[in-house]
Amino acid sequence: MIGQTVSRYRVLEELGSGGMGRVYKAEDTRLGRLVALKFLPADLARDPVSLQRFEREARSASALNHPNICHIYEINDEQEPFIAMELLDGATLRQRIAGRAASVDEVVAIGAQIADALDAAHAKGIVHRDIKPENVFVNDRLHVKLLDFGLAKVSPGVFSDTLTQGAVVTDPTVLVTSPSLVLGTVSYMSPEQARGETLDARSDLFSLGIVLYEMATGARPFVGATPAVMFDAILNRDPLPPSKLKPGLPDGLEQVILRLLEKDPAHRYQGAGAVLSDLKSLQRDVTSTSLEAMHTGRHRKAAGAWRVRRSMIAAAVVTMVVTVLAVAGWQYFGGSERSTSIAVLPFANAGGDPSAQYLSDGISEGIMNALSQLPSLRVVPRATAFRYRSASLDLKQVGADLGVRTLLTGRVIQDSNGLSIRVELIDAASQALLWGDQFNRAPHDLVEVQGQIAQAVADHLGVDVSEPERAKLAKRPTTNPEAYKLYLKGRNKWDEWTEESLEASIGFFKAATELDPSYALAFYGLADSYVARAYMSQPPKDNMPLAKDNLTKAMALDNSLPEVHYLLGIINLYYDWDMTSAEREFKRALALNARYADAHFGYGNYLVAAGRLREAIPDIEQSVTLDPFSFTWNEQIVPFYSALGQLDRAEEQARKSLKRDPTSFWLHLDLGMVMVRRGKPADALPLFEQAATFGADNPYPIGYLGYGQAMAGRRDDAVATLRRLDDLSRKRYVPAFARGLVHAGLGDADAAFEMLRQARDQRDCWLLWYFILDGAFDTLRSDPRYDELLKPLRASLARGAS
């Protein structure tokens, strides 16, 4: 293509991609000027729909003679379709902001020009339908050009022959929901666009609000790992106020953005002219003061000078719900505000004493938990960060994997003189040392030094920390250093997740509460161990009441711990079958920490129990988004996909997770049940066999082994597995649920129902989960005893769901 002459244009160089095609710099040999040529690729040139979109782009833009809209000279639709347009000097808005917040004057200046261009387009009956940073071009003097009208909706009569308004497109950035409806880029859609409704000019204004929000904060207001999660955020979630991500943002600018993002078009700006007027009003007050300077407090009077018209302020009453989708999900999936995100990697146990490992892990986790209390800082959760336990890490790759720029590493040495903690704050991209220090402390200063390190990290990252937040960083959960060490040992043992380690953790937590009866986290740790023991095939009735008792004590001491409310919600749901209380506790946990992956998962479980399985998926997926390397969420999302009939997705997730955790018996069970639902019991059996091997004497995988043997036609083996469970029951607690699985596989309905009645009376923690999601008992659903069996459970759930 370079050097060729097409029509009257000599192609000089390739400039890159632009919407549907490739863009080249060329010389107009007739008029002696430089132009840009946008060519439609050969495969799309043969597609009538793509040709129509290409023509719409040219004709819509050429109908608009406006300084902020890219001028179109001509369209050639013969052998090599191309559009000749003005050659622009600069970069797209996406390239310009590159995931970073722009200055206030830049946001206002660029926003005003986009609004001006939209006002002209809307006046001509043209709705753009794909406003996003990629379609805004900005030169060095902040002059804006709006691009790509290929998805524009054009009112009849604008052209002499009306273009078809709807078409199926093949552009991967466009989501098509029906053969006759084109939608724009998912993450910049308006609610009415996401619902497939008829659009007017106000849809473009919502998209403009997303663009301005991203410019002002460096992050998008609606985020998600999948289109389903993104749709849920756009339709149902209120965005975090921009000032929460960028403290000091002028009130006037925030009000403009939030009014643009009103979900009801009637409450939004009714025209781009009004937006332009308010931005012009703000622009008159713009000085060269940067937003960064406002953050430091040097120009707080200038920040207060920002104003907006009274009518706009009165109309912009918005309730802001703090949701994790606005501050966390997008930061894992591109475009994140990486300067305000950090991963605290597990500190090295430099002393080499294995018995002191709990100390180095505990210190890094303590710093992590302290930083997590700052709403403007994203902190990678423990389960994900602790995957990177190695002295030979590629820190640049770690930063890329986790979507963060900064990493905190450390070394801990404990000797007779006390503790020596060396910390380094590192820019992952350049691997440059941003800050480092050594803290030599006596053992009784362990809790205090973690808060000091967290505060120093926040200061060096430039995070704005309010006085209440500073107080949280300095807060000491216990003043007893021995109690704190016992707590750290308890958490270390809990993480091993074996029956023996849980017994040890209970001992450590109990000792911590005895040394310090005001230690709320120790009571929570004790409750967490009891709940885990109930799920590890201990009698629930012997553990759940103890867990609730300790959670009650923790809440009385400190009601602001999200983990306490989450765990109480789990007990309310799976043991008490109390939907009302479960919902309340999960919502309380999310209100305390919108980025808490466990709470999103818990609330998703509540929605499942309420019979709202599809509504649950966004929260379940969000738990994985927030903590992508957590075994728990990556495993437990599989049954959700399977229950929805998304078997390909369920299998893909299970196999991907098995590569990380190849000895997990839970993942083998999940994948085995996917194979059963595919009608492939012979393929499921080897998975159940592996699960039983990895699970040792755990009754659940043994029960699934018998179920798989029966489903594969190996009845004698299934009966032998039943005897194995009987033998095991003489040594330990074996839930009736495990035997019920085998009887269900054998088709012995009488015995299966008897076992399930016992499981119901035992309040088996897995009963609700597996009845809704698993499918092993689907063969019993047509039996009247099935409904009778679940009547007490359903009655309880119905009371809460109502």
Image (spheres, rainbow, N blue to C red):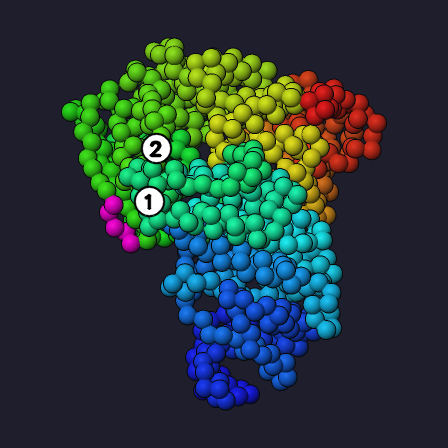
Q: Amino acid at mark 1?
A: Glu
* x and y percentages locating residue 775 in the rendered image: 70, 37
- Residue 591's spot in the image, x, y percent? 51, 28
Q: Depth check: 207 or 665 in front?
A: 207
Tell us which disc is closer to us: 2 or 1.
Answer: 1
Q: Which residue is mark 1?
A: 292
Q: Is residue 281 above or below residue 522?
A: below
- Image side of residue 746 versus residue 661, left or right: right
Quarter location, residue 758: top right
Q: Looking at the image, is 204 positioned above or below residue 794?
A: below
Please state the horizontal and vertical placement of residue 446, each as a whole percent of the image: 26, 24
Residue 712 visible in the current orientation: yes
Disc 2 versus disc 1: distance between alpha carbons?
Answer: 14 Å
- What residue do we see at 72% from left, 24% from top? 802
Q: Is residue 473 magenta-colored?
A: no
Q: Which residues are magenta?
A: 430-434
- Comes first in the chain, label 2 or label 1: 1
Query: What residue would you read off at disc 2?
Result: 465
- Does the magenta stretch mainly form a helix, a strand or a loop? strand
Of residues 477 and 731, the one nearer the viewer is 477
| In the image: residue 411, left or right of residue 725 | left
Residue 351 seen in the current view = no
Residue 547 horizontal/vertical position (percent) = 52, 17
**From the viewer's perspective, is 1 left or right of 712?**
left
Q: Residue at x 44, y 55 (%)?
A: 109
For residue 331, above or below residue 55: above
In depth, the one of 220 and 138 nearer the eye is 138
Q: Residue at x 43, y 14 (%)?
A: 557
